[in-house]
Amino acid sequence: MSETTTKGQDFESALEQASQSVAEFDDHRSGFIPWLQHLLHTNPSLVPLIVLVLSTLSLGVYIDWGAISVGLGIASPEEVSNGSFRFFKAFTLTLILQQVQIVGVLAAAQTLIILTAGIDLSVGAIAVLCSVIMGQFTFRYGIPPAVSIAIGLAFGTAIGAASGWLVSRVKLPPFIVTLGMWQIVLAANYLYSANETIRSQDIEARAPLLQLLGTKYTIYGATFTLGVISMLIIAFALAYALRSTPWGRHVYAVGDDPEAAELAGVNRHRTLISVYMLAGLICAFAGWVMIGRFGSVSPSATTGVIGNIQAITAVVIGGISLFGGRGSILGALFGALIVGVFELGLRMAGADPQWTFLLIGVLIIGAVAVDQWIRKVSI
């Protein structure tokens, strides 16, 4: 009995001397680089925002250096060729917004698809076809413009639903489905319209509602159109929905790991189809924005051919992972603005237009490389 008591006392004394700290993992990611990597992983739109600010500042300083040097007292107005601001003024900066409004809306649709680890090559073609439907239904059949617009929006949603069903239920690769849909929609566009353009004068006289999103408002030199305002509303609304609603979390879950999402109770099929339908609706809305931007309805608009490439470019530069499950709508908006800044800035600087494509190509490769580096934080 005394031996048992002694062993118990030894055990209690050893227990009292034991460490009281709870189990914890060693942090082998300490330091600035791992901290930066984690920061960019949790804030995917931060990289494109930084690039946007730096590119705007650098191009603006280069273009407006004469006016800046005069303002700082470095030079006199007589010593510079142009002492007034050209880039750093409200009109020019809002002109960039006007130039990217169509691509910005298409990029929002493309982002939704890419977040589910897919890709949509038909976004531009859907926009053009839906703009043609809005115009032709109004002028060919005499349908009120408001109804024609609603029909165009419904048609875009239906195309998205068809693509979503093929991807989700038939299990075809998104690349193949949307590549085929791109060809089908382009051909339907030319066959239905007979390549007939509806002139802006006719639209302005008979159906001004079709040009509504081209309405301009000037505030202290800054010019905004309803199309630009609509682009910003779509971007912020989708950003909120993806971040703060169950549907948004389902979208990220399906894109990151569809099997795990299903095991967690997410309806993968319903989520995918809803994403493609919403993307189709947004593309159709981009068609309405096109009418406001160009004033006319043209089945041969270049958006039908290169709109998908422009949207993918904005999405990739915007930091959205092509592997799905990571990214932000605001990042895609920043990506579209980066392209717009380079296009307008280099043109104002008198540079060869090919430099724009060269720099955008570098940005695309760099954005994917950064994404791969950021993804290592989760390994």
Image: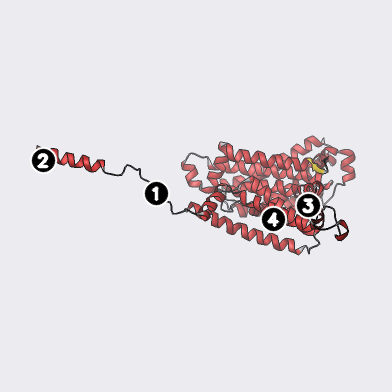
Where residue 190 is drawn, which disc sits there? 3
Observer-side mark, 2 or 1, equals 2
Label 2, label 3: how many angstroms apart (C-alpha)? 98 Å
Give the mark, 2 or 3, whose residue is nearer the N terminus. Answer: 2
Disc 1 packing (10 Å; few <14; some 14–19; many ≥20): few
Amino acid type at circle 4 is Ile
Amino acid type at circle 2 is Glu
Say which element carries label 2: helix
Pick the front one: 289 or 329:
329
Figure quadrant of the N terminus:
top left
Residue sitting at 85 percent across and 38 percent down? Answer: 208
Q: How is the structure coloured here?
A: secondary structure
Disc 4 packing (10 Å; few <14; some 14–19; many ≥20): some
Label 1, label 4: how many angstroms apart (C-alpha)? 45 Å
Amino acid type at circle 3 is Tyr
The residue that mark 2 highlights is 3
Q: Is residue 285 visible?
A: yes
Amino acid type at circle 1 is Phe
Label 1, label 3: how many angstroms apart (C-alpha)? 62 Å
Give the mark, 4 or 3, whose residue is nearer the N terminus. Answer: 3
Observer-side mark, 4 or 3, equals 4
Q: Quadrant of residue 230?
A: top right
| Residue 42 position within the rendered picture, expressed as x and y whole percent measured from the top left | 55, 47
Give the mark, 2 or 4, whose residue is nearer the N terminus. Answer: 2
**Residues marked 4 and 3 touching at CB (< 8 Å):** no
Pick the front one: 256 or 281:
256
The residue that mark 1 highlights is 25
Say which element carries label 4: helix
